[in-house]
Structures are given as C-alpha cells and as structure tokens.
Amino acid sequence: MAFIEGGWPNVTHEADREYFGRVADLTLRHARIVAFGSTRRASLPAEDDPQLRGVLDAGTSVACLFGKSWGLHVAEVLRTDLVTNLAMIESSVAFLAAHGREVIYDAEHFFDGYRADPAYALATLEAAARGGASRLVLCDTNGGTLPLTLHDVVKTVIDTLGRPVGIHTHNDAGCGVANALMAVKAGANHVQGTINGFGERCGNANLCQIIPNLVLKLGHQAIDEEQLTHLTEVSRLVSELANLHHDDRQGFVGGSAFAHKGGMHIDAVQKNPQAYEHVPPERVGNQRRVLVSDQAGAGTLVWKLERMYPALDKGSATVRGLLQRLKDLEAEGYQFEAAEASFELLAKRALGDFRPHFELLYYRVRLDREGEGGTVHEATVKLRVNGDVRHTAAEGNGPVNALNLALKKALEEFYPDVARFHLTDFKVRVLDSAAGTAARVRVLVQTRVNGFEFGTVGVSSDVIEASWEALVDSVEYGLGRLEAEPDRP
Amino acid sequence: MAFIEGGWPNVTHEADREYFGRVADLTLRHARIVAFGSTRRASLPAEDDPQLRGVLDAGTSVACLFGKSWGLHVAEVLRTDLVTNLAMIESSVAFLAAHGREVIYDAEHFFDGYRADPAYALATLEAAARGGASRLVLCDTNGGTLPLTLHDVVKTVIDTLGRPVGIHTHNDAGCGVANALMAVKAGANHVQGTINGFGERCGNANLCQIIPNLVLKLGHQAIDEEQLTHLTEVSRLVSELANLHHDDRQGFVGGSAFAHKGGMHIDAVQKNPQAYEHVPPERVGNQRRVLVSDQAGAGTLVWKLERMYPALDKGSATVRGLLQRLKDLEAEGYQFEAAEASFELLAKRALGDFRPHFELLYYRVRLDREGEGGTVHEATVKLRVNGDVRHTAAEGNGPVNALNLALKKALEEFYPDVARFHLTDFKVRVLDSAAGTAARVRVLVQTRVNGFEFGTVGVSSDVIEASWEALVDSVEYGLGRLEAEPDRP
C-alpha cells in the first residue's frame, strides 16, 4: 500500500489548498493521497479545532496526524502536561476516525522521547491506538539516533505492542537510509521518506536508496521490478520539478553511481561489471559510464572511441596526442563527463576528421542599461559558410540568449535543422570562485534534437564566451549527427 | 592514532610523486603519512615488483597495501588462482615489513568475498597477518553491503581471528556512514574514510559524519572536543581546495544542518534548541540559522531583525509589507539564505531607512570577438553621487569583471573604502535551466571587508544584470556597515 502525503491543508498557502482540490480529480493506480496535520490544541475539543477541520476538509480518505512523544516538547513547546497530551492524541485521532478517515499516527520525536521516558513514549502510541489509528509510525524527527539503538527500540516497541509499526527517519547523523532499513529488519512494515531525500535540514530518509535496497537486497516487494527500472527517471524528474541540483553522488540513481574513472577500475569492469558494481545499473534505470578524464589511460580512450573508430591503435601518436590535449583542457577547467559531444568533437579534431560547418568572423554583444529601466541586449554575428558571408543581429532577454538567436539566424538558411535544436539545460559553474568577477566559468549546455540529447562544454573567464563555445559545439555536433544518421541523430 | 593516506606513489602523475617528497618535510603533530599500493604481480617476486618498490621509495613509515579477498576478482581481474593470491598477499606485506614499514592491509571486496566463500576471505586476512600486517581492514569496496549484515560479518571475523579489525566503507547503498559505525559497534578499532565523503562513484564513508557520531554519541575519543569544534571549518576548506560544491545538506557540517525554516520549528527552537537539534551546533563549529523565506511568519522576521530594530511591531503594516515583498522576490528566484546582506538592505528599504550611496544613470557593456582571436570586454558606467556625475570606463577579462572595475573606479573618489572590498566568492545558478539561454539566473556574491564577510544576491535573465545587482548590494551594504561600525564593518 502506497501513500502520498500532500501537505498540511490548513496552512495559509493558496497553493496547498489548491493542491487537495485538484489532486482529488486524479486517477491514481497505486497510491492514496494523505492530508497531514497535528493533534488538537490543549484548549479546544477536537471538533472545534480549526486545524483538524482543515484536515477533514481536504477530503482525503487517509489522514496523517503527528503528536508529541517527548516530555520536553510537551512541557516546553506545547506548554501543557503529560496527561493532557495523551488525551489530545487519542481524541484527535478518534475525531478523524469517526468521520471515516483512515488515520496514520506519526509519533514525533519518538526515539528522543523513548530515551527520556520509555513508558510515556509507549503510552502515547497506546493513546493513538485507542483513538483508532491504523498505523503507528515512530519518527526520529531530529535525525540523531544511530542504527543499532534504533533497531533495538523498534524491536522492543513491536514486541510490547504486539503489532508492527512504521518508521520515519531523518539524515542529520548521516544514517537516514540505514535507520529505515534497520527498522524494517526489526519488523517495521511501513516506511516514510522522500524522493532524493528532499526535506528540512539534512533531509528525510531517501526513498531512492531505500526502495532498491528493500527490493534488490532484502527481498521485499516494495514496488515491482518493472517499476524499479523507472527509479532514476523519477529521481531526476523530482529534482527538475523542485528546481534543485540532482545529486550525482546519490546511490543507485546518481549520475556517478555507476561511473568508473581510474584506469584499473575501468579495466576490471570491462572484464566483469560485478567487479565494481553492487547492482546492475539497468535494474534501477541507470547506466554505466566510463569517464574520460586525465586519469584515463590510452586503453580507456580507445575503448570509448571504439564505436566511431574501431581500428584505433592504442599506441599511436594520435591517441597519445589526444590524451595530452585532454589533460591540458582538464587542467584549464574543462570537464567532459557531462559533455560527451564536446569530447567526440575533440577526438574528431585530433584525428583530422572534423569539418566545421561554419567559420566565425566576429561576434559583438552590447548591453545598455538606463538607470532603473530595462536593459537592451543586442548581439551581432558575422560568419562564413562555404564561402558565403552572413551578418545578422538579434535582441534577446539576456546577452547569451541574444547571441544564440543571432547565431541560429545566420545558420538557418544553410542548415534549416538548427531551428529544431532545443536547449534543454544550461548550467554555469564558477571554477575559481574566490577570484570574484575575474573567475573562470564552465558552461554546460544540454541540447535535444529529435529526442536525442547531448552535452557540450565551454570554459572562459567570460561567461558569454564560454557559452558561445558550448553553443558552437552543440551546433557542430548536432549537425554532424544529423548528417551521419538522418533518422536518429 | 591518525593516518593520512597520501595516494599511490608509483602512478604516472608528477603531482603524486612530488607530494611524498614535500610532505616528508612537514611537522605533523597527530597523523602519520601512508603510501598506498597493491599486492605484487603474480609473476614477480615482491622485491622485483616496480610498484612495491615505488611504495618503498615514497619513504613513509607506514604503507597500506590492498589485496583481493574475492574469488571473482582473483580469477577474472588478476587472472590467477586462489593459492597464488594468498602467496602474493603474504609476500608483499612481508617485503615492506622487512624494510621497516608498518603495513596496513586493506582487504578489498571483503564482504562480497565473505559472502561467496567465508573460509577463503578469512584465509586472505590470515595471509596478511602472517606477512606482518599491523592492521587488517575489511573493505566494502562496492559499497553495497547493508548495516546488519556488515555488523554480523565484522563480529564473526573479530571472534574468529581473536584480534580487532579496521573498516573501510563506501556509500553506494546510502549506508557508508552507518556501516562504519556498525563495524565500530561490532569491535572495529580503525575507520577509513574521507572528508565530506569525497571519493569514487557515490563516495567513501564521510568522516565529517563518522567522527562527531563517534565522539558525541558513542563516547569514543576519536579526536578531542576542542579539535571537534574545527570540523565545519575543515569540511569547508576541503571542499574549497577540491573546488567542489560544499553540500549544505551534510549532517553536522552542512550549511543547512542546523537551519530552521518552518514557523513552527523556529518557534520551538526559540523555546529550546534541543527541540529540533540532535547536537548543539557549536560542538562541531557550525551554527544555528533562522532562514528568512516565504515560509517565515512575521514573528520570525521580527526575531531576525531584532538587533537592528529592537522595537519592531510584529503586527505593523510595515512588517506585513516586508513579508509580502519577501514572498514576491522568492517567487522570482531570489534566495536570501546565503545573502543576508541583501535581506538587510531589503528590510531597510521597506522600513524607509535606506539612503543609497549613488544613483545609476546607465551602464553599457561591449564584447567584441574577432574570429579565433581574443575578446575585448569594455564597460562604461555613468552614475551620480551627491549631485556629482561620474562617467568611467574599464576593460576586464570578462564582462562582469569589466563592469565591476568601472563601478569601483567611479566610486573610489567618493568612497575610497571600496578599494578594500574583496570579492571572495562568485556563484551563478541557472534557475529554470530547461529554458536554455533564456533562463533566469541567480548570482550570489560574497564580499570581504576588514575580515568580515557578507553575501548579496541578484536575479535576472541576464547574467550580467544579475551580477550588477549583487555587486551594487555588496557596495551599499559594505559602505553602510563601515559607516555604522568603522572599527568592525
């Protein structure tokens, strides 16, 4: 049974209220939507508490209420007494249950509360159970409990209550994922977490780690094997929607999770992927990557270029020259891990196999900002294509945008395909940021053509020049691909 | 006893060779430097193996050798037999020990090897012990072992060998830190890891999590309490040196580890920090942060501005107006968590307390790039200071640099202090990166004046305009501070 907790419906955000209205119209195949809330105030009966009314008004079939398990919170945050808190828990759960809601009870700070006073912490769970809660979830709200302690507490609680519990962990001690798994080993049958671990402070338990561990290693049918192959895609999508950087170092779903760089590791993985991979990347929808970098040897380079140049000789001067050029560029701040198209162009140039589609004569960019008014951005580009000179100008809503538009305009007549090149990602990384505005920057551009995506890179102390470089590579690579494989660029 | 593993001295990198030469001259108070290497080749006696010679030539008092524990690796990667592998381990360790080295033995893939064939995995450890290894370290090289399994294996190995072991874990299953702690609970007395968990794929076990857990929670004297207060500083420094983003979500040492955003959490932490903090931030040299954001309420805002405006009324129209302005700006992509100086200027403006130091009439930026030649960047700035108009121009090695220089030039005559404003950090984040070159960008600038640092922010679809905004805030805030507190800006 899967639940999606949709937030606290009585907060002042219009967006949160709108959410429950619209989500009710979705047809969900696997999950049920849950409204979140807290136990009632000490001073009000549950039916008069506006916050509990809000949970009810969200109209979900399931509600999740959190309550206090820890005397410190009861006394200093709620400012009430231990007996009243038990009554608040029981009556709040009972109120929602009486209105036909399935109620999940989140025992906030359970592990801190249990350490301070085990009997009282257990009494809060019993109060929620008497109120009719279907699931009792032990929360490590401050994220500081360590795995063995957590395991033993979960086991004792399950033995004492004679029923399974759920687990909700945070990552403040770096153990959010491990703690959730330890709880499952101790008998928990319900895990709360978030995609990519997004959450307050150091994050919640990361479902993109927990789910594959449960399915592939502990043999639990958390989701089926086919669904699991979409995990990397879901992880990336959620980062995109949240407009947060996708952590490449995440286990299973990160861009580096199955990336091999050192020559010895690459050599071993060529012999048997199991040598340095704990699970096959395709099981979680991820893929193996062989990173070309200054740590790569000639063998890796040749392996990498095999598809394009099957006959390449590892010992040749050309390959040695390419390797040296790669090392020099990496020392300048280039990175080809996320810009394999630029790497291929580099290899083509080194192998004398590159024919440029155009030659730049010059570009100029102007920015005029008047006082508090807007800024005008104008770019002019002059270039030569097969002997013909084209000189174009464009305005954009930023200097790089203006330059990109002027470039496309100048090329469209010769290469109408460039109109279909869609930039799907544009990243700027300041390299030596301590150098302030004189720092070098690396620009990574991701381009999509006919559903195929590729990355290019540029480096300069001028962000516009670095962008230009990445844009030019994107055009050159995209056009080259379309010519080589017209159907699938 | 602390060890710093300095790398593999016989690789082809000049930098690695230089390292061992120079590190020998350092006076280290706590740690010993370790040279890393592997067991000898199957075909050579240890004394003829050039790689082992390299480890010896590094001149360290300690060496760390890794060898194979897993039949799969012996057969498919080394391409030798199980008995030869045992001889390789014993003779390689013995060779270095005979030359006076203390030898740490890293049993690579120990947990995978143990799962496949426990007796053979144990036999490899015994071979290293016979060779004279002082420490036997169990490595979870592929990072896929889960905490309870790892705990039980470590315990069995210690019981069988009758001596403690070390532990070396990776984070591929999201359990790197937990696994190291579980091993310690099982009796391991030596932990290998890296600062910030930097390492291949998903990283090594993160010492910035392991150390505070060992010291503050498990009562081990891994480092003393005073040293522990430098942990956050060390973590940030290593990110700086590696030129990698410092992960704000890292436990203990991350910028968000003790950050409170939701109104309810801030309210509770005001009453008692323990309510939502698993350890006091100052123990690890970090600090509590109250984040001003659209989730903040008027109470938080007033608490935050208390130092500047002690008499501010939470219910006033001014505070409500400032809160609304804050929400609007965050919706546009501004973020004030790392730009508290911009937040203070915003508050001053809302409270009618802001007097600008200058007024912009216009700026213009030109970029001229000729073919493959260099690019000329020129900025002109015209502004008014107390009725006087100044018009300056500057060239820079990028457009933002040129603009910054022209701005400082125009202001220096009136405010000579700006010459001492040092930009220590300059970051560009593309917000809606899928919009390609038309995306909005957020620029964060960090400025140091007289040893005091502060952050400012700008947002625009034009990276230069966003930079200008952050630079102007930096000048306005820095000058304001110098006037208010001339001794300590």
Image (spheres, coloured by chain):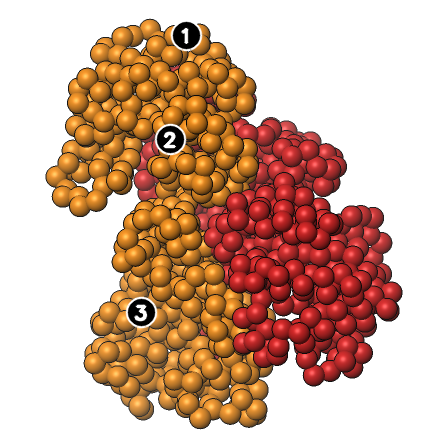
Chain colours: A red, B orange
Q: Nearer the viewer, residue A412 or A133?
A: A133
Disc with the residue nearer the chain's start (3 vs 1):
1
Quadrant including the N terminus of chain B: top left
Q: Position of residue B222 (x, y in %)?
A: 32, 47
Image depth: mark 1 or mark 2 in front: 2
Q: Residue A11's quadrant in the figure? A: bottom right
Q: Give residue A65's quadrant in the image.
A: bottom right
Chain of the residue under the numbered disc 1 shown in the image:
B
Residue B487 placement, left or right of B334: left
Q: Give the quadrant of the C terminus of chain B.
A: bottom left
For image coordinates 80% across by 68% down, the residue present is A94
Task: Determine which of the numbered discs, if any, sits on residue B165 in the image.
Answer: 2
Q: Which residue is mark 1?
A: B83
The front one of A468 and B119 is: B119
1 or 2: tag closer to the N-terminus: 1
Mark 3 or 2, closer to the camera: 2
Disc 3 with disc 1 on a shared chain: yes
Q: Mark 3 highlights which residue?
A: B453
The reply, left or right, for residue A233 in relation to residue A202 is right
CA separation in Å, label 3 and label 1 = 61 Å
Label 3 – label 2 distance at C-alpha = 45 Å
Secondary structure found at label 1:
helix
Q: Residue B340, image x and y in percent?
A: 42, 73
Judge by depth and name the residue closer to the eye, A489 or A114: A114
- For the residues labelled 1 and 2, the Cα–Cα distance comes to 23 Å
Amino acid at the residue labelled 1: Val
